[in-house]
Amino acid sequence: MSSVQASAAVPVPGLASPSADPLDALVHWSRLLGADPSLVLRGGGNTSVKTDEADVAGRPVRVLRVKGSGSDLRTAKRADFSGVRMDDVLPLFERAEMSDEEMVAYLARCLTDPGAPRSSIETLLHAFIPDGSVFHSHADALLSLINTRDPHAVLDEVFGEAVLRVPYRRPGFLLSREVGEAVRAAPEARGLVLLNHGLVTWGATPEEAYERHLALVAEAREYLAREGNPRVFVSDPRLRLDPRARRKVAAALAPVIRGALSGERRVIARYTDAPEVLEFVGSEHGRRASAAGAATPDHILTTKIHPLWTEVHDPADVEGIAAAFRVALERWSADYRAYVERWRTDEPELEAAPRVVLVPGIGMWTVGRDPKAADLARDIYLHTIGIIAGAESISEYRSLPEEEGFRAEYWPLELYKLTLAPPERELARRVVLVTGAASGIGRAVALRLAAAGAQVVATDRDLAGAEATGVLIHAAQGEGSALACPLDVTRAEEVEGAVEAACLEYGGVDVVVSNAGIAHCAPIEELELEDWERSLAVNATGHFLVTRAALRLFRRQGTGGSLVFVATKNVTAPGRDFGAYSASKAAEAQLARVAALEGGEIGVRVNMVNPDAVFGDSRLWSPEIRERRARAHGIDPERVEDFYRTRNLLGVEVRGEDVAEAVLFLAGDRSSRTTGCMIPVDGGVKEAFPR
Ligand code: ZN
């Protein structure tokens, strides 16, 4: 097993070498296990070590340190392993049965620290194995061997009788006892396979349990490499498109798919056309195999048992695929309701919508409440494809029995976890596209809406500036919450490109903030035609192109939408020497009103905010504009801010953040009965009162 030795010795950056402390050793070897996604996917697997500790009064006590719920082995730290008193849990081995609720309540009282995270649902499995350390994973290669028509024959061939087997049973007390009995009856075994579920190994130390784990996985991989067919799934050549054309179709389909899957609550949809996905979804063989179901009970909570498969005849025919998708969705939902009916439960029915959508020739969408959840579904299904390919290459892929799948999906303990999730923020599940997001009001709006939970597509002519806004959002809200796109709003193809990018990244758009604008200052007698036309191109035509693209997208998506225009106080009260600006912004305002008239029938609300004199990092206020506005008002350029502040009723400076608050109100559901409206954010300028 030299290969295993070698991989065990690979240092992981930022990871201290294991010390003599058993818990430190557990952290070290758990992180190594968690570092390989083909062994452990985010949040999956669990590990433990038994240690001698002192209790609160200083008395010696034997403690099981086992992964707590909600932590990830890849980033495990000491505090993630809850301590459970062995003297309290070992007597349970004599019991005949114990319900999940009883077990969870019992284990909570065995914790050495009452504030520790709830210990894993597989805690008793770790406790009942007498050895010092236990490792459990759902390694891909193992699942390829055991999710097959005749897993016993396959296991015989790969491991002989050296590895124990326990038939599928939902994690809980009975499974733990069966595992404990099997291991105690055959302590010399190299490991234990939980059919349709995963692998368990043990040893005197975490290092030993880890190395045995990796040795068995390595043998499984070697067997698959030797006996399996490396190209199980081969896509139909008639379904192949070049990548550009494929992504064009995907961008047009995404809002249709996202809209249809956004029932009571919206979802974020992630797209991938990874080569293995295209081969799988493009083959008849993949279609049949995918119908078998999930690879482990854990996965069902994220992906549901079955993906949705769309019939595709011509991969370039967007409308044909969209129609086929709707038919497939109706069938999927009907099948899901029948499945819930078949296995009846007291738990309320979960949403009858798939989380994985497969479209031959185009790729795969996965959905979730946010990009992270959708990415987890994507990662799980990518691994599922690999597991299915392995199983099909040596036998025939089989999932756990349908009833067991149902019990895993409707497991009260997992449903309870869902109720513990924090309440969602105002713009959670929404995608917002902001133009002119590199600075000033646009940046303030992007940051504010992201803080309210939105996924933000920050666009600007200045891509570096838009990217900087994206970096600020990622730093505050986490990776995946923003996308930066180059966008000159006067160019129709760039506007369409930005909307397509949003659709590929998040599945669609819910809110568009049409903000990009320029200012030009000159008395009409001196105004150059070129400057007039440039103002109209950005401040009028730009808004038209953005509005047209937004309305077309909202109609395809079918979930309404909100358009917010950043207009200006000048719309209602124009200023002298500001002809090009005031006239072009008035065109924007009139366009917004017409968009409100036309958008109502599809649930699209259109509103405006009218800021006045927002300075900060605004690029509108170039030194030249400042100079010219000062001249128009007959004041010193240094005093421009003071001038604007003192001329409003409240005597306040208006900031980008103030405008962003009004935009947030108009973007979200708090203004669900408001359209065609104009909100001034100007400190009170009486000439500009809307009427
Ligand atoms: Zn498991």
Image (spheres, rainbow, N blue to C red):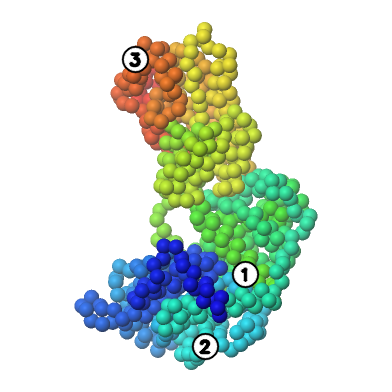
Which quadrant of the figure contains the N terminus?
A: bottom right
Marks 3 and 1: CB-CB under 8 Å?
A: no
Secondary element at image label 3: loop
Does residue 114 appear anywhere in the picture? yes
Q: Amino acid type of disc 2?
A: Ala
| 415 relative to 321, above or below | below
Q: Quadrant of residue 598?
A: top right
| 393 relative to 161, above or below | above
Residue beneath label 1, please? 387
Q: Amino acid type of disc 3?
A: Asp
Q: Nearer the viewer, mark 3 or mark 1?
A: 3
Mark 1 packing: few (<14 Cα in 10 Å), some, or many (20+)? many
From the top left corner, tell me how far across and down residue 408 is, in percent. 52, 71
Marks 3 and 2: CB-CB under 8 Å?
A: no
Whole-Å distance between the Cαs marked 1 and 2? 25 Å
Whole-Å distance between the Cαs marked 3 and 1? 72 Å
From the top left corner, tell me how far across and down residue 253 is, in percent. 65, 47
Q: Nearer the viewer, mark 1 or mark 2?
A: 2
- Compare marks 3 and 1 and give the one earlier in the sequence: 1
Q: Residue at x 56, y 61 (%)?
A: 379
Q: Which mark is residue 636?
A: 3
Mark 2 packing: few (<14 Cα in 10 Å), some, or many (20+)? some
Disc 1 C-beta below 8 A from ligand 1: no
Residue nearer the viewer, 501 or 18: 18
Mark 3 packing: few (<14 Cα in 10 Å), some, or many (20+)? few
Residue nearer the viewer, 237 or 449: 237
Which quadrant of the figure contains the C terminus?
A: top left
Residue beneath label 2, please? 189
Left or right of 157? Residue 178 is left
**Residue at the extreme left:** 57
